[in-house]
Image (spheres, coloured by chain):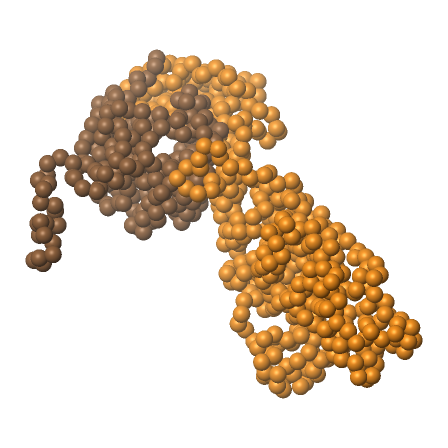
Chain colours: A orange, B brown
C-alpha cells in the first residue's frame, strides 16, 4: 500500500484564478466575515501580503489588490472533481478536506512504469489543471498528508523508512487531525521534532496533551487502522469555472476550457469511457446563460480534439454579453472503442483519423444542417428516388432516421439517369405555344413515360427525354402531361 | 559570371539538355513520376498525366465551359474506385443535387458521399481545406468561383500536399486566365455532341497538350 497525497495549498485562490492566464491585477481571496486574507497569488505575495493578514493591511501593502470572497462550496466541488480526475491513476481515491486528495498508487506503480514516472505524470497533470500542488507518498494516509504539508516531495516507499521520515517532522507546522493546542503544548515543553514526541511515555502524553495525539501517531505509523472512505466518481461530469473578470475573448475562453477538459479527460480515463455529448453553458451577468450543445458522431475521449471542436463551436456563436462563468456537462460515459491499428500499414500519413472526426469538425463550425448524405429510394418519381439522410460515419449500411436499412439490390432505373438533379424542375422557355420543343434542343433518347404517384397526392405524369443543346450540353428534360403542358429541365448529364 | 557555376549556361539550364525538345528534363519530371496517382479510367488521359493518372496529394483544377458536358463523368471511374473504401467522398458546395440513383448505377456507393453546404465563401474555403487535409476523406470535390485570392489556392494546395486524397476544384472557364498552384489544370469543352475536348493547360513534367475523349452514348 502506498498512499499519494495531492495537496493544493492555494485551493481557495486557484478555484477563482486558474481560469485566467497570467496578467491582470494581483489577486487575493478573503474570508468575508472575518475580513482576513485566506490566500494570495504570487504578485500579491511579492508585495508582502500573507494569509491571516487583515484586509486593510493587505490593501495598504499592495495597491490595486483585487479581493474576491472565499467560496467553500466551489472549493469542495473542485476537490471532488480533482478526486474524479485522480481516478485515472488508481481505483482507490479518497477525499481529505479541506485541500487534499489521497490516491492509493501501490497497485499502479508497475502500470505507470515506476515511482518516478508516476510522479512526473501526476505533476504534469496537476499543472495542466492549473493547480499549485505539493505531493508526498507514504505507506499510511495520515503520514502522507503530514509529509505533503511539512516535507513536500518526499517519497517513503515502506514502513522502515516511514519511522525515519516521521521522526524528522517539525512541530511548528500544523499537523492535520492533531488539535493546535496539543502542538502548542508540546512546543511549550521544548520539543521540536515528532521523533521526540514518539519516545515519550504514552499514558502521560495522553493525559497531558489530549488523547487525539497518540491516536494520530498510531494511525500515522500504521499501528492503528485508518480507513479512507472511497470516493465514487460521478456518473456524468459537471464542472464549473468562474472567470475572475467578464470575458468575451475566444482565446481566453479556450484557455479556461482547457482546464475543464483536462478534468473531463481524467474522469473518463478513470472510468475507461468516452462521451458522445457535451454541453457548454456560458453564464452571463444577471443569471442569463447561453447553452451550446456539441453532439459527437462517435464517442470521444481526447481532450485536444474536444477542445478543437468546442473552439469551432464558439467561433460560430454570437455572444450576447461577456462571459462570467463556464459550465461543462457531459453525457454519461460510454464504453470507449479500443483503438485498433491497421495491419497492412497506415499509409503516407501518421495515425489515421476516424471518419467521425471529420464530420464532427465540419459540424462544429458549419452546423449539423450543412452536412448531408444521400441515398437512393424506392420510387419511380425521379425527385423522390433519392433521399437526404444524415451522414453515417461507420458501417456499410445506411440507416435512415427510423433505423431501417434501405432495401439493397433495387433494380436500376430503366432509362439513363443524370448525375445532377435540379431541386425543382425549371420550366424551359417555349416558342409558339406550350406544346413545342424549345428552340435548339434536339431529343436524342426517350421518351420514358413516368406516370405514377396517385396514391399519396403527388401524382407525376411526364415523358422524359435526353436532349442536347446547341452548346453541347446534355440535359434531362420532360414534357408535362397533366394540366399546363410544357417542357421542363430536371437534370444535367455531367 | 561567377566561375563557380561551371558548365551552366547563364540562365541556369544544364548544358547537356537541348531546350524545347519535349518534356523538361530535370527534377520536376522525376518528382512527378514518383508522386502517387490514381488511374482516371481513360487510357488516353492516363498517358497525358504525370504518374499515369490523377495526382493524389495535389490539386486538380477542372474548368468546364458549361455544366452538362461530361465534366463529372470524367471523374466517375476514379470515384468508383475510391468509394469502395471506408472514407468519405466530400462534395463542397455542389451547385445541384448529386443524383443518388445515377451514382449507384455508375458504381459510386452513395453511402460514402458527404455533401457540405456552407453559407459563406469563407466557410466554403474552410470546409474544402479541412476535407483536403483530413485522412478520413478519400476525395474532395469543391466548386469554387473564378475570383479567388491566390492565398486561398495556396492554402488548399498545402492542405492536400502529402496526403493520399484526390482533390478536384471545379471552377468557371474564366479561371483559366488566372495563375494557380494546381498540379493539373484542364479546360473542358464539348466537341460536337459525342466528344469532350480536354485542354490540359498545366501538368507537372509536361507541356500543355490537348486530347478528346468520347462521351458515353445515351441509351434509348
> In the rendered image, which quarter contains the C terminus of chain B?
top left
Give whichever of B78, B211 is nearer the camera: B78
The location of residue A434, given as percent across then percent down, is 36, 22
The location of residue B22, given as percent across then percent down, is 13, 35
Q: Is residue A328 visible?
A: no
Give whichever of A380, A103 is nearer the camera: A103
Q: Quadrant of residue A486?
A: top left
The location of residue A324, given as percent across then percent down, is 61, 64
Above or below — where is B204 with respect to A463?
below
Give the residue at x 39% y 26%. B81
Above or below — where is A46 with respect to B58?
below
> In the rendered image, which quarter contains the N terminus of chain B?
bottom left
Give whichever of A340, A221 is nearer the camera: A221
Q: Is residue A13 visible?
A: yes
Q: Quadrant of residue A253?
A: bottom right
Q: Quadrant of residue B127?
A: top left
The location of residue B79, given as percent across then percent down, is 38, 29
Numbered circles on residues, count: 0
In the image: residue A434, left or right of residue A285: left
Give the residue at x 44% y 40%. B135
Give the residue at x 52% y 47%. A364
Give the residue at x 90% y 78%. A208
In the image: residue B74, left or right of residue A47: left
Give whichever of B94, A63 is nearer the camera: A63
Amino acid at each position: 500500500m502506498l498512499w499519494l497525497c495531492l495537496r493544493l495549498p492555494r485551493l481557495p485562490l486557484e478555484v477563482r484564478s486558474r481560469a485566467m492566464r497570467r496578467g491582470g491585477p494581483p489577486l487575493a481571496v478573503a474570508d468575508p466575515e472575518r475580513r482576513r486574507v485566506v490566500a494570495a497569488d504570487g504578485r500579491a505575495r511579492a508585495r508582502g501580503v500573507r494569509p491571516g493578514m487583515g484586509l486593510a493591511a493587505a490593501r495598504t501593502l499592495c495597491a490595486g489588490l483585487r479581493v474576491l470572497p472565499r467560496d467553500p462550496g466551489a472549493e469542495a466541488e473542485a476537490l471532488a472533481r480533482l478526486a474524479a480526475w485522480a481516478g485515472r491513476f488508481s481505483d482507490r481515491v479518497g477525499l481529505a478536506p479541506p485541500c487534499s486528495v489521497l490516491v492509493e498508487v501501490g497497485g499502479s506503480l508497475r502500470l505507470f512504469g515506476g515511482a518516478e514516472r508516476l510522479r512526473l505524470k501526476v505533476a504534469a497533470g496537476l499543472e495542466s489543471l492549473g493547480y499549485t500542488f505539493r505531493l508526498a507518498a507514504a505507506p499510511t494516509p495520515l503520514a502522507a498528508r503530514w509529509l505533503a504539508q511539512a516535507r513536500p516531495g518526499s517519497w517513503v516507499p515502506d514502513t522502515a523508512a516511514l519511522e525515519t521520515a516521521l521522526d524528522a517532522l517539525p512541530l511548528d507546522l500544523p499537523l492535520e487531525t492533531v488539535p493546535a493546542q496539543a502542538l502548542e503544548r508540546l512546543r511549550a515543553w521544548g520539543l521540536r521534532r515528532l521523533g521526540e514526541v514518539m519516545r515519550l511515555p504514552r499514558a502521560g502524553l495522553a493525559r497531558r496533551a489530549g488523547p487525539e495525539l497518540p491516536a494520530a501517531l498510531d494511525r500515522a505509523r500504521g499501528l492503528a487502522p485508518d480507513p479512507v472512505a472511497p470516493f465514487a466518481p460521478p456518473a456524468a461530469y459537471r464542472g464549473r469555472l468562474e472567470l475572475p473578470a467578464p470575458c468575451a475573448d475566444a482565446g481566453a475562453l479556450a484557455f479556461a476550457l482547457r482546464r475543464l477538459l483536462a478534468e473531463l479527460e481524467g474522469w473518463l480515463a478513470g472510468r475507461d469511457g468516452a462521451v458522445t455529448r457535451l454541453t457548454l453553458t456560458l453564464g452571463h451577468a444577471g443569471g442569463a446563460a447561453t447553452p451550446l450543445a456539441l453532439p459527437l458522431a462517435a464517442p470521444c475521449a481526447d481532450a485536444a480534439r474536444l477542445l478543437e471542436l468546442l473552439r469551432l463551436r464558439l467561433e460560430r456563436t454570437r455572444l450576447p454579453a461577456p462571459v462570467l462563468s463556464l459550465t461543462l456537462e457531459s453525457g454519461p460515459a460510454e464504453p470507449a472503442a479500443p483503438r485498433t491499428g491497421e495491419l497492412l500499414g497506415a499509409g503516407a500519413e501518421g495515425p489515421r483519423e476516424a471518419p467521425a472526426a471529420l464530420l464532427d469538425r465540419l459540424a462544429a463550425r458549419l452546423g449539423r444542417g450543412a452536412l448531408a448524405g444521400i441515398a437512393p429510394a424506392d420510387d419511380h418519381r425521379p425527385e423522390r428516388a433519392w433521399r437526404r439522410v444524415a451522414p453515417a460515419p461507420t458501417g456499410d449500411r445506411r440507416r435512415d432516421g427510423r433505423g431501417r436499412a434501405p432495401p439493397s439490390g433495387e433494380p436500376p432505373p430503366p432509362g439513363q439517369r443524370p448525375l445532377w438533379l435540379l431541386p425543382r424542375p425549371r420550366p424551359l422557355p417555349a416558342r409558339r405555344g406550350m406544346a413545342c420543343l424549345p428552340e435548339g434542343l434536339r431529343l436524342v433518347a426517350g421518351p420514358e413515360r413516368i406516370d405514377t404517384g396517385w396514391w399519396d397526392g403527388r401524382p407525376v405524369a411526364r415523358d422524359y427525354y435526353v436532349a442536347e443543346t446547341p452548346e453541347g450540353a446534355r440535359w434531362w428534360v420532360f414534357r408535362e402531361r397533366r394540366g399546363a403542358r410544357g417542357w421542363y429541365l430536371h437534370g444535367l448529364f455531367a | 559570371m561567377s566561375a563557380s557555376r561551371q558548365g551552366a549556361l547563364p540562365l541556369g539550364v544544364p548544358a547537356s539538355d537541348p531546350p524545347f525538345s519535349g518534356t523538361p528534363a530535370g527534377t520536376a519530371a522525376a518528382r512527378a513520376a514518383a508522386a502517387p496517382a490514381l488511374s482516371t479510367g481513360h487510357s488516353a488521359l492516363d498517358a497525358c498525366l504525370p504518374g499515369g493518372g490523377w495526382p493524389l496529394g495535389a490539386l486538380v483544377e477542372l474548368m468546364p465551359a458549361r455544366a452538362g458536358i461530361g465534366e463529372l463523368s470524367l471523374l466517375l471511374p476514379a470515384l468508383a474506385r475510391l468509394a469502395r473504401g471506408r472514407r468519405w467522398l466530400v462534395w463542397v458546395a455542389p451547385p445541384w443535387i448529386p443524383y443518388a440513383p445515377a451514382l449507384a448505377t455508375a458504381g459510386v456507393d452513395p453511402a460514402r458521399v458527404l455533401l457540405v453546404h456552407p453559407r459563406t465563401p469563407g466557410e466554403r474555403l474552410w470546409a474544402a481545406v479541412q476535407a483536403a487535409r483530413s485522412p478520413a476523406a478519400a476525395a474532395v470535390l469543391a466548386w469554387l468561383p473564378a475570383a479567388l485570392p491566390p492565398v486561398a489556392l495556396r492554402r488548399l494546395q498545402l492542405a492536400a500536399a502529402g496526403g493520399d486524397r484526390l482533390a478536384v476544384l471545379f471552377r468557371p472557364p474564366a479561371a483559366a486566365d488566372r495563375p494557380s498552384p494546381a498540379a493539373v489544370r484542364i479546360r473542358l469543352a464539348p466537341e460536337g455532341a459525342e466528344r469532350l475536348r480536354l485542354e490540359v493547360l498545366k501538368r507537372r513534367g509536361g507541356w500543355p497538350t490537348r486530347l478528346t475523349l468520347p462521351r458515353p452514348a445515351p441509351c434509348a
